[in-house]
Amino acid sequence: MATNSMVASVMPITSINLRRRNRSTGLTLSCSQQEAPSLGVQLTEGEGKLPKVLLKSANGCEAEIYLFGGCITSWKVASGKDLLFVRPDAKFDGKKPISGGIPHCFPQFGPGTIQQHGFARNVNWSIADFSNVKGNPTITLELRDGPYSRSMWDFSFQALYRVTLNPKSLSTELTIKNTDTKPFSFNSALHTYFRGSITGASVKALKGCKTLNKDPDPNNPVEGIEERDVITFPGYVECIYLNAPNEVELYNGLGDTIFLKNTNWSDCVLWNPHLQMEHCYKDFVCVENAKIGKVQLEPEQSWVAEQHLSIS
Ligand code: TA6
């Protein structure tokens, strides 16, 4: 439940019906009534009238998060530049996952036995907590199992996703807890879409990693070792880097160097669809912190992974 007094709201939080039940998922959004100062955490309506959280920091940075999918769709740094990318074909209809920003892949990265990238990105998350400490807003979203998730993955779980906006960084912490009476295993990723110019974009720090190259056949990845200091995107790219370093550097081709630091996201995935998405492939690159190997959790056990995106 939300208990902090520093929450803000573009419209009073109570003017959005936060107790509505999503018909397709059975999951409930919940948040308590709060007052409305001007910076911090705001709840508003986004595209398709979907509930959207705005984080606004004192130095002019902003982030947007849709409760649908717990998806961060925008991270604007102080200059006003949005470093994330939402595909022009993204749907905001509460049915299809939002294609862009930072969608969750949970409880499966895929391919696998359930839908590609799992269900966490196509259900409503709820607001568990929020604060605005020293001008750095934070929100924690929560996802629990419901009839929809149980229909494909029959386990009781709790996912908590804390998002913090700092002057030069956007940090997330994902906690998965086994609330079941039996063990379960999963894998996961933050499928981050960065705005970029694909002809100029490059990624550093992955040299020496073991690779699983999914081009040309995602179901039969080819094993290899990355030998390049600087990885570019001259064509279709879909490659998993196992045991990646916990800091990777992306140059987006638009003048920005973005550092991706992580704890516990052991692997990294690079993806650009090239001509498979002719209408937009030139404008983004996906650099995904991932946990490709299965995480096994006994009842009451938790797994925690952090991602810190920052600019210099
Ligand atoms: O992470 C790479 C990948 O799994 C590709 O195989 C491609 O299918 C892509 O993700 C799909 O992303 P989307 O956001 O459209 O679900």
Image: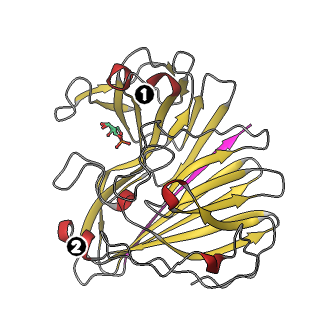
Indicate the secondary structure of the residue bearing disc 1: loop
The residue under label 1 is which amino acid type?
A: Gly
Magenta segment includes 306: yes
Report whether 11 appears left or right of 23: right
The residue under label 2 is which amino acid type?
A: Arg
Report whether 124 appears left or right of 129: left
Question: Is 217 situated above or below 186?
Answer: above
Q: Nearer the viewer, residue 292 or 41?
A: 41
Dominant secondary structure of the magenta stretch?
strand
Quadrant, the C terminus: top right
Magenta segment includes 193: no
Report whether 43 appears left or right of 80: left
Indicate the secondary structure of the residue bearing disc 2: helix
- Which residue does the image show at 52% across and 70% down from the upper left? 141
Quadrant, the N terminus: bottom right
Ligand 1 location (quadrant): top left
Write down the residue under mark 2: 150
Disc 2 residue crowd, few under 14, some 14–19, many 20+, Cα 10 Å: few
Q: Position of residue 176 (x, y in %)?
A: 41, 69
Q: Position of residue 139 (x, y in %)?
A: 62, 68
Which badge, 2 or 1, is on the more N-terminal residue?
Answer: 2
Residue 155 occupies quadrant: bottom left
Write down the residue under mark 1: 208
- Which residue does the image show at 75% across and 81% down from the upper left? 35
Q: Position of residue 200 (x, y in %)?
A: 57, 17
Label 2 CB sits under 8 Å from any ligand 1 atom? no
Mark linked to residue 182: none
| Residue range highlighted in magenta | 301-312
Q: Nearer the viewer, residue 276 or 108?
A: 276
Question: Is 179 situated above or below 285?
Answer: below
Question: Is 271 situated above or below 112?
Answer: above
Report whether 230 appears left or right of 117: right
